[in-house]
Amino acid sequence: DGGITQSPKYLFRKEGQNVTLSCEQNLNHDAMYWYRQDPGQGLRLIYYSQIVNDFQKGDIAEGYSVSREKKESFPLTVTSAQKNPTAFYLCASSGTENTEAFFGQGTRLTVV
Amino acid sequence: AQKVTQAQTEISVVEKEDVTLDCVYETRDTTYYLFWYKQPPSGELVFLIRRNSFDEQNEISGRYSWNFQKSTSSFNFTITASQVVDSAVYFCALTGAQKLVFGQGTRLTINP
């Protein structure tokens, strides 16, 4: 089945450690996005990519890094520089800007 | 800069009441697209509707309807005869300049 897959669903990290969240899509979409959602808050854009080997910072990119080596994959690394990483992270993809985005099930990251 | 504002943080109504969720947007683009998404407790966002900036026709889909008014930069969402299953967080979103930007979301609770 076509779709977008995020893994893992739950992730625990010790302070000071980097962690990478996976996002894979088999929809042949060019655009991919990463969002952060805090309790009771909206979705804030971290990074987005419109094409392989190219990506742009969103509104809250500090402390995060991404890569887009393959069309299907857009992993997000939460680095130790991110001061408050505990949040729900959502990955999305879309064919073009005028089509709807499809979302993964999200990864809930907790720093312990 | 693009911005989406959903001024209603939380709405609570009794089942069968009609309810309207407000969305106001800002953009300098002449061509843009507006979306509504639903986020149930599971966390995954579900696409509801897309509207482009050149199409101001209102749309009705069952109990759902959308009112797009370019003159007031608004894209409001009405649920008629609400049901408990409509309880969720609803997000309005805007694309333009290759970014997909979301509002803060409105938490809708339908009480039996």
Image (cartoon, grey):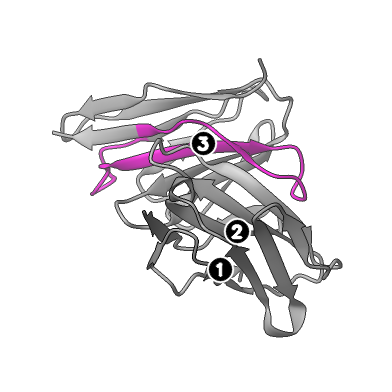
Callout 3 secondary element:
strand
Membership of A96 in magenta stretch: yes
Q: CA distance from mark 3 to mark 1?
A: 19 Å
Q: Quadrant of the C terminus of chain B?
A: bottom left
Task: Look at label 2 and name its amino acid.
Answer: Ala
Residue B32 position (above or below residue A69): below
Q: Residue at x 86, y 68 (%)?
A: B54
Q: Chain of mark 3?
A: A
Chain letter belonging to callout 2: B
Q: Which stretch is magenta?
A: A78-107
The alpha-carbon separation of the residues under discs 3 and 2 comes to 15 Å
Please rate how many residues cluster around mark 3, counting C-alpha atoms within 10 Å: few if below 14, some from 14 to 19, many from 20. many
Where, quadrant-wise, is the N terminus of chain B in this rendering?
bottom right
Label 3, on which residue? A91
Image quarter for residue B58?
Answer: bottom right
Q: CA distance from mark 1 to mark 2?
A: 7 Å
- Amino acid carrying label 1: it is Val
* Residue that carries the numbered disc 2 in the rendered image: B93
Circle on res. B4: 1
Q: Position of residue A104 (x, y in %)?
A: 52, 31
Magenta stretch holds residue A56: no
**Which disc, if any, is residue B79?**
none
